[in-house]
Image: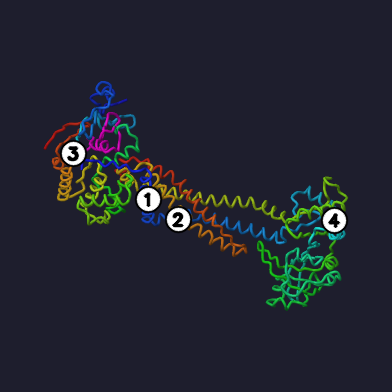
Amino acid sequence: MLVNIRQAQKPKRRRFAALWESFRVSAGSLRANKLRSSLTLVGIVVGVTAVIAVVTIIKGLDQTVATTFSSQGSTVFTVSKKPRVITSREDFIRFNKRKDVTMDDAEAIFRLCSVCWRTGVAANSLETVKRRDKSSENVAVRGITPVAMFDIDAVTIDAGRIWSESEGASGRELCVVGADIGENLFGSEVPDRLIGQKVNVGGRPYEIVGVLQRLGKIFGQSRDNIVYVPYSNYQKNFGARDSLVVFVKTAAAADLEETEDQVRAIMRSRRGKLFDAGDEGFTLETQDVFIDLYKKATENIYFVTYGVAIIALFVGGIVVMNIMLVSVTERTKEIGIRKAVGARQKDIRVQFLIEAITVTAVGGAIGVITGFGLAYLLALAMGFPLLISPWSAVLGVGVSSVVGVIFGLWPAWRAARLDPIEALRKE
Amino acid sequence: MSEATTAPPIAPDSIVQTETPAVTPVIGSDTLILMRDLWKTYEMGAEKVHALHGVTFEVTRGEYLAITGPSGSGKSTLMNLIGCLDTPSQGEYWLNGKNVSEMDDDDLARIRNQEIGFVFQTFNLLARATALHNVELPLIYGGVGSAARHEMAKKALASVDLSDRVMHKPNELSGGQRQRVAIARALVNHPSILLADEPTGALDTHTSYEIMNLFERLHAEGNTIIVVTHEHDIAARAHRVIAIRDGQIEKDERIR
């Protein structure tokens, strides 16, 4: 056979054949060195698990915060003496110089605000609640008026009823309790059996007229450890000389701006302030301030957590590089053989890169699964919703593959650059 | 600069200037290899060691050539140059009408893939791959599609009487069978040269004869064969012997 077949292969086809060979070889080599492969995998799995768990937990946390702080909805805003969040001493002093928001202010808003849908006032304090030998400390006692405040707070009655407006105005010791009160002070009694019973709130006996549906926890803090009392009674028993907070709810989110403008105008005229005349003398804010504060406070924490996750991935990458370098050394002879029969530098480079990517992608996939598992356990323990986003799975595998490429580059380059004569000589 | 240890008879530069004009040589249609004044110099620290100095020869298509010489004579260096695993420091190497001495790494890889079929002393098969896959290897890097690849590899294995060992791995084969797999791999791409480096060095006498008989058959079928060996009886099977000593051709004779 004297005639040489000069195969005029298309470059595309050549690339595919060599690529497929690379997959075969890397799969074979990973199978052949099980311990080494699993050690490499662990490096990547840990990194990706960390990333996925962190991302999932953060998403769950964000979601929890968003739903909790906007449980009153994006249709509620408040009028108060000072913002709920004060970040500087100067502001603190300035806000304290303002006049208190009084019942007169609240009534003016109730009366004059034509676009307001629900309005109310609320004041809080922490009290000890007792029944016979049982007691709960630091229970939130919330004095409200009118009963529309229940709507604004977005709580609903599970058993019994809400007090009537006339009962509320009478100043009698009536209350609507959160689910925790029943559980902590009445044991396993069904909510219906609580109605008409007495509890001692801050030293005075109160009659339970209603029990609220359970709201759940946020940050491990129960939102059901609460006692609602009529504001007139609250004022009498818990000394509400503090400034009030007026709550306004609009019928739809679209009405919020117009309603805010109207309430602002009412308050300005009451404070005798002109438009743009420095401090207004009151604060009008939505629940968004909490979310903003939360974002600000957690931003740095997230940054650090992401940083830690990235370091974990980096360490995983170093492990991959280390193992790949060992692999290149061990397979020097094989590289020599491949070069002798016509493998180009690029073919060898691609082969080792694919091997690195295969390990890291498999590690990434396992890491995604364990990451979600870990996030699930954490979410369960901390009472967050588990938000699994398919994107983070794609991201996990993608990022780890990129790690494979980055940390596989140098070993692959070294393998490709081996001198075939030296490589063949090696045993 | 000390050249005391391996002082060449003539400095390489002067040869280029005086004897070799920089023109493309006229190569006869049957000329497969043309080596002209080939030098290979290694720098060992400050010293220059000339593994080859001024080697010139020609090989025509269909020859059966043996290159002999004691160890350290430069025959391995010459083999590496013929096999395009290395490039000369100076001089020209024309293979099948192409000036190999001026090629880069990737071009050399392609030449090795298309023009050279290597047979090594220690077989150099991929341990984890089957005989079939080992034989397919040059075709993979040659970009042959999988169906054609299987076909060609099976045919090559059949030509070395290994049709019944296609799916065996090297450790399931005897030494002679392994060398036959290596020969099938060398032949599968229909190269210009079958280049064997001590092909019987790791085999017993009986198996060595088998392999040499196979070489003779392949030569009879028209293949160009170059065997590098230090064993005289192996070299004696060739039709022409080039003896290398101290980096130069000592003897170049037709024995058959």
Label 1 vs 2, first from the N-terminus: 1
Disc 3 residue crowd, few under 14, some 14–19, many 20+, Cα 10 Å: many
Residue A414: numbered disc: none
Disc 2 residue crowd, few under 14, some 14–19, many 20+, Cα 10 Å: some
- Disc 3 to disc 1, how far (Cα)? 36 Å
State the residue position of label 3.
Answer: B62
User: Is disc 2 placed on a helix, strand or loop?
Assistant: helix
The count of marks equals 4
C-beta proximity under 8 Å, tags 1 and 4: no
- Between A294 and A331, the one lying in front of the other is A294
In which quarter of the view is residue A79 placed? bottom right
- Disc 1 to disc 2, how far (Cα)? 18 Å
State the residue position of label 2.
Answer: A362
Label 1 vs 4, first from the N-terminus: 1
Looking at the rendered image, the disc whose residue lies closer to the viewer, 1 or 4, is: 1
Which amino acid does the dot numbered 3 rest on? Gly
Q: Position of residue A423 (x, y in %)?
A: 32, 43
Which amino acid does the dot numbered 1 rest on? Trp
User: Is disc 1 placed on a helix, strand or loop?
Assistant: helix
**Would residue A57 be found to the left or right of residue A202 on screen?**
left
The residues colored magenta run B71-98
State the residue position of label 1.
Answer: A20
Q: Position of residue A327 (x, y in %)?
A: 38, 49
Q: Is residue B16 above or below residue A333?
A: above
C-beta proximity under 8 Å, tags 3 and 1: no
In which quarter of the view is residue B219 placed? top left
The residue marked by circle 4 belongs to what chain?
A: A
The residue marked by circle 3 belongs to what chain?
A: B
